[in-house]
Image (tube, rainbow, N blue to C red):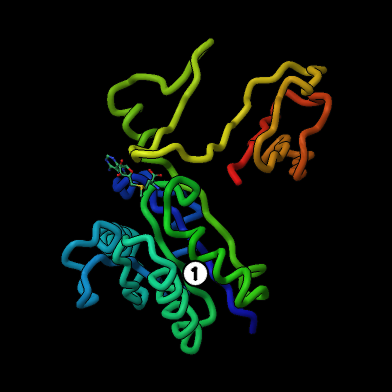
């Protein structure tokens, strides 16, 4: 049986803000890989573990938990270690979920691990899936009833670092028929149309004319 790896976004810490898809994925996994910053692999400091325990209690399921030591030093050997723990868990299990807080597309460990898996184990990479989640800043916005962007405003996400960093830009709210030549790409741009609806299309380039209202472009950092 093919091994399957799910990267599951848990949302911002409220178990009611986990998606139904994430919950179903956890319930159908053989085991759940949970990051911990504790060297002794305990979950004393792990918020993620707390969420998983609460979810299992609330939704009446129980899965083996595999601790993944995540020291957050941003070193290649640390990511490699985590990937190796996942590989070794696959000796006992066919389907694993690796969980992260918020949404895995925003500053999460997930892509460091997938970058390694893509090279070392292309089959597992192809069999991996990412489950999107609610970000911390979506939740922050909701808590104070303030929009992140509305009308003629825009949203910026700035990491608090002491250097310039490459950026991802999202373009939304185009007009049908719009010529996209004004969008200057600096990384890897994709066009997303009707995501999750009839006629969904995702292409790794910028479409020259906007055909559908439900279109967004993401110029991913390189
Ligand atoms: C490594 S990033 C992970 C972001 C996460 N993937 C998301 O979608 O929000 C961690 C940063 O996100 C922000 N963050 C995450 N959870 C938060 C929370 N519950 N309250 C406030 N800020 C939070 C903080 O700025 C924190 O330093």
Residue 206 or residue 161, whichever sits in front: 161
Q: Is residue 204 left or right of residue 49?
A: right
The residue lying furthest to the top in this view is 152
Q: Which residue is mark 1?
A: 28
Q: Is residue 194 left or right of residue 167?
A: right
* Among the 4 quarters of the image, the one containing residue 160: top left
Residue 137 versus residue 72 in the image, above or below: above
Residue at the spot x=35%, y=19% of the render?
A: 146
Residue 154 versus residue 116 in the image, above or below: above
> What x and y, as percent, mark residue 73?
32, 62
* Among the 4 quarters of the image, the one containing residue 56: bottom left
Residue at the spot x=75%, y=41% of the render?
A: 200
Residue at the spot x=44%, y=64% of the render?
A: 26
Q: Is residue 140 left or right of residue 157?
A: left
The residue lying furthest to the front in this view is 163
Q: Is residue 127 left or right of residue 76?
A: right
> Looking at the image, can residue 23 be seen?
yes
Residue 52 or residue 204, whichever sits in front: 204
Q: Quadrant of the N terminus?
A: bottom right
> What x and y, as percent, mark residue 53?
27, 64
Using a 10 Å C-alpha cutoff, classify the residue at mark 1 as few (fewer than 14 neighbours), some (14 to 19) or many (20 or more).
some
Q: Secondary structure at mark 1?
A: helix
> What x and y, as percent, mark residue 81?
41, 76
Residue 145 or residue 163, whichever sits in front: 163
């Amino acid at each position: 049986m093919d091994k399957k790896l799910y990267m599951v976004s848990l949302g911002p810490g409220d178990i009611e803000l986990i998606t139904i898809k994430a919950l179903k994925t956890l319930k159908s996994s053989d085991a759940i890989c949970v990051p911990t910053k504790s060297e002794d692999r305990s979950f004393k400091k792990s918020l993620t573990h707390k969420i998983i325990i609460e979810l299992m209690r609330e939704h009446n399921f129980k899965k083996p938990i595999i601790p993944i030591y995540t020291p957050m030093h941003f070193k290649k050997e640390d990511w490699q270690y985590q990937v190796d723990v996942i590989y070794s868990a696959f000796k006992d299990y066919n389907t694993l979920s690796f969980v992260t807080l918020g949404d895995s597309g925003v500053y999460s460990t997930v892509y460091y691990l997938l970058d390694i898996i893509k090279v070392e184990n292309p089959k597992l990479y192809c069999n991996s899936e990412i489950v999107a989640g609610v970000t911390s800043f979506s939740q922050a916005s909701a808590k104070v009833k303030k929009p992140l962007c509305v009308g003629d405003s825009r949203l910026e996400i700035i990491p608090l670092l002491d250097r310039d960093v490459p950026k991802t830009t999202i373009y939304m709210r185009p007009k049908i028929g719009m010529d996209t030549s004004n969008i200057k790409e600096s990384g890897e741009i994709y066009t997303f149309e009707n995501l999750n609806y009839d006629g969904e299309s995702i292409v790794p380039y910028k479409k020259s004319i906007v055909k559908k209202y439900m279109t967004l472009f993401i110029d991913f950092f390189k």
